[in-house]
Image (cartoon, grey):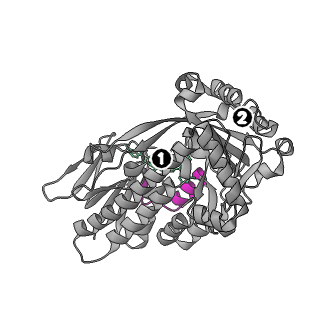
Amino acid sequence: MTEVIVVGGGIGGLALAHGLRGAGVGVRVFERDRQRSDRLQGFRIHLNPHGIAALAECLPAELLARVQASGGRGGDQFTFITERMKRLLHLDKDIIGSGHLGISRITLRQILLSDMDDVVRFDKRFTRYSHAPDGRVTAHFEDGTSATGDVLVGADGAGSKVCAQYLPHARREDTGIVSIAGKYMLTERNRELLPPALLSGPKSVLPPKSCGLFIAPHEFDGGVNDRDDPDALFDNTAPYLFWSFSAKREHYGADVDSLEAAGLHDLVLKLTVGWAPQLRALVALSDVDSTTRLPIRTSVPVPKWETSNVTVLGDAIHSMTPFRGIGANIALRDAQLLCRKLIEPERPLLSRIAEYEEAMIDYGFAAVRASLSTARQSVGDSRLARMAGRAAFRVMDAVPSLKRRAFSTIGT
Ligand SMILES: Cc1cc2nc3c(=O)[nH]c(=O)nc-3n(C[C@H](O)[C@H](O)[C@H](O)COP(=O)(O)OP(=O)(O)OC[C@H]3O[C@@H](n4cnc5c(N)ncnc54)[C@H](O)[C@@H]3O)c2cc1C
């Protein structure tokens, strides 16, 4: 029986592990830690129909049902507005299709970790791998322990150690874009201060200048309650609006890379002078301590490499900017495809891994390019180009067939 070692218990690695275990393949996941201390992990992510289909294939039915029950509201619409809150373009279910889901990243990971005590080993920080004379592969961990299997999958996210050893030429680069993100807690009082339109679904604010603001409500009717988990660092059920202001580094006119939370918060307020008071209130009344800087990086596509029994999935190989909201969906698609290949009987293992890699490199780096292009459009337009874009959005908004043609693949 094939034994698979997965390094990294994130979204892709855990989905793969569920799929393999469900098919009776031996699988162990080694995760560096259990601390959900990365603040960004608390944010909402958007799952599209492809990501949900991948989960449906990999997860037991009851876990899929928990994912679906944990989704937030407003995931099947998207609106572009001006900085004065005038509608530019609204995309509803008819345009983007149904089956989209907004879910807390922590919640998704918690669900994926359910019932995996026999598979996931925590506190295992991968350092390197080596090959035995019989071709099997051994993963070595910082605590001096190791694990040997027939296949090693690097699912250890952006900055992957597996990828660094296996494909040292694969790089990530800085896009020059920096996002500043925050949370506006939707307490009863705060809710009254904002117009209901801001709470109805994700929005992208396109001001005339070279910057943008993304807003997404994070509201749930039910689902996993992290407050029941004694180790939880977050109250994961409290509703909030997530916002993220993005611009090229030079647009900030300050050393954005060295500012603390309060300085980042002030900077966004300074750069949004003249915007609608409701949008400014959203930033002004946000929890200052939750303001976070996110330098936007992207992987650089690499050509197909020679296949071996070490492979990679998700952000470990094709990390992308978050501007299209598809990184996790692509990681799930990798997990689905690699799982199919690893459980296929009879044909040589390396041919099956090669088929996975060929397809994954193709769609994975296409997603990287698309995400980079969206990131650049979101912040990089000249004033003239931005005004022309806004005018085009207004026209499309009035002509559904144009909208459909231009936006049927948004979020996928
Ligand atoms: C602000 C933001 C918003 C986003 N929004 C969306 C969205 O709306 N939709 C979407 O599809 N995607 C979104 N993404 C992207 C998405 O989060 C990632 O693409 C996705 O998490 C990648 O999954 P993964 O399994 O490859 O990596 P991860 O989920 O990052 O998992 C990697 C795991 O490996 C572990 N690890 C790392 N190094 C080691 C080591 N040496 N040893 C052992 N374990 C290790 C880590 O602890 C982690 O658990 C967003 C990203 C950000 C930053």
Task: Tell me if 245 is positioned left or right of 280 in this view.
Answer: left
Of residues 22 and 295, the one drawn nearer to the viewer in this rendering: 295
Numbered disc 1: secondary structure: helix
| Residue 199 appears anywhere in the view | yes
Q: Which residues are magenta?
A: 105-121
Residue marked by disc 2: 287
> Within the magenta stretch, is there residue 388?
no
Query: Residue 354: which numbered mark, if any?
Result: none
Of residues 69 and 226, the one drawn nearer to the viewer in this rendering: 69
Of the two numbered discs 1 and 2 on the same chain, state the one appearing first in sequence.
Answer: 2
> Within the magenta stretch, is there residue 107?
yes
Task: Tell me if 211 is positioned left or right of 54 in this view.
Answer: right
Task: Tell me if 91 is positioned left or right of 31 in this view.
Answer: right
Query: Image point 48% across, 72% down: which residue?
Result: 57
Residue marked by disc 1: 372
**Mark 1 touches mark 2? (CB < 8 Å):** no
Looking at the rendering, in which quadrant would you find the N terminus?
Answer: bottom left
Task: State which mark lies toward you, 1 or 2.
Answer: 1
| Residue 236 appears anywhere in the view | no
Compared to 19, does 258 lie above or below? above
- Residue 112, given in percent of the width and then of the height, sits at 52, 59
Numbered disc 2: secondary structure: loop
Type of amino acid at the residue the image marks with label 1:
Leu
